[in-house]
Image (spheres, rainbow, N blue to C red):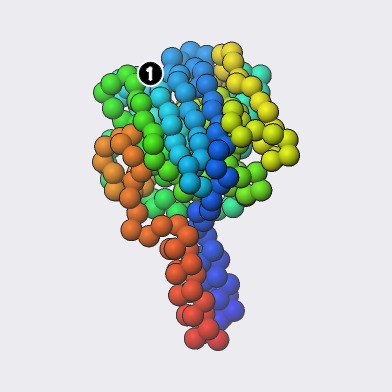
């Protein structure tokens, strides 16, 4: 009985997405986001490293509430192939226990997820989803601690697809993140070019972790696209402290 409880507690202690750590300075990845067939959402999404932190920089159009919002932007496992957003696969989740953190369509705050419970690739889950009246969203200049541009990191997001999904979880636009600065084969980044063409948005699923329910937006920010949602317990600190507490409790049981 005690061994069963111990195993359960240890599994719970580890089930948090860790922060990625530092990335090499001078590296940048960009993606031209092109609308899927039948949709008009498009734009630009970039990542660059400043003082070891991965900084977001993006501009999307066609993201108003009246156009199908709220919108989510996530990094998926694969690059886009054959202009088909479905080929991006599920949300990038290298640790296997993250999930897609989504908000309910009626904009309520119940069932909010902590950023540490989101998959690595769930950028809008870490930062903020887009739920605005305007048709465009221009944002950036803030970090996402869960993304890495270090090819040796398990959380490396280079050469993967950025997918925008609407409120119905239809993939409305996508593009592959390509290295544009600090690229060389020796570093592991390689040299790439930007994707082009019109992707196919026929696949309505964004992740193997997606469910029929749409839980709330993680963090405390209430202004869509305004910057990172705050968390009183950053992923790495929370994981370490919570894990230590669980292990101590398990020792008492033994």
Q: Is residue 98 left or right of residue 83?
A: left
- Residue 121 showing in the rendered view: no
From what the image shows, is residue 136 above or below residue 22?
above
The N terminus - image quarter: bottom right
**Residue drawn at x 56%, y 46% as measured from the top left:** 23
**Residue drawn at x 55%, y 70% as measured from the top left:** 10
Q: Position of residue 18 (x, y in %)?
A: 51, 56
The C terminus - image quarter: bottom right
Q: Helix, strand or loop at disc 1?
A: loop
Q: Position of residue 142 (x, y in %)?
A: 39, 40
Nearer the observer, 131 or 126: 126
Q: Position of residue 141 (x, y in %)?
A: 39, 36
* Location of residue 89 (image quadrant): top right
Q: Position of residue 51 (x, y in %)?
A: 48, 46
From what the image shows, is residue 96 above or below residue 15?
above
Binning the other alpha carbons within 10 Å of mark 1 as few (below 14), some (14 to 19) or many (20 upward) gives many
Q: Is residue 106 left or right of residue 202?
A: left
Residue indicated by mark 1: 62
**Residue drawn at x 41%, y 57% as measured from the top left:** 234
**Residue drawn at x 54%, y 28% as measured from the top left:** 30
From what the image shows, is residue 92 above or below residue 64?
below
Q: Is residue 223 left or right of residue 60?
A: left
- Residue 155 showing in the rendered view: yes
């Amino acid at each position: 009985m005690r061994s069963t409880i111990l195993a359960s507690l240890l599994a719970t202690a580890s089930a948090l997405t860790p922060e990625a750590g530092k990335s090499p300075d001078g590296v940048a990845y960009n993606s031209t986001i092109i609308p899927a067939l039948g949709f008009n959402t498009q734009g630009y999404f970039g990542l660059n490293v400043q003082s070891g932190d991965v900084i977001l920089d993006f501009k999307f159009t066609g993201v108003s509430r009246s156009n199908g919002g709220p919108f989510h932007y996530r990094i998926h496992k694969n690059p886009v192939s054959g202009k088909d957003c479905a080929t991006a696969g599920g949300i990038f989740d290298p640790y296997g226990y993250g999930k897609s953190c989504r908000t309910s369509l009626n904009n309520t705050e119940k069932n909010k997820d902590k950023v540490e419970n989101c998959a690595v690739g769930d950028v809008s889950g870490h930062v903020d989803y887009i739920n605005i009246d305007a048709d465009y969203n221009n944002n950036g200049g803030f970090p996402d601690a869960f993304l890495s541009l270090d090819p040796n990191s398990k959380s490396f997001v280079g050469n993967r697809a950025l997918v925008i999904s609407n409120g119905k979880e239809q993939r409305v636009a996508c593009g592959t993140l390509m290295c544009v600065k600090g690229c060389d084969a020796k570093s592991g980044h390689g040299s790439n070019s930007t994707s082009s063409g019109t992707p196919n948005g026929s696949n309505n699923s964004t992740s193997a972790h997606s469910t029929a329910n749409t839980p709330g937006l993680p963090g405390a920010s209430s202004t869509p696209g305004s910057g990172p949602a705050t968390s009183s317990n950053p992923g790495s600190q929370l994981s370490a402290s919570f894990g230590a507490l669980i292990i101590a409790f398990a020792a008492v049981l033994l």
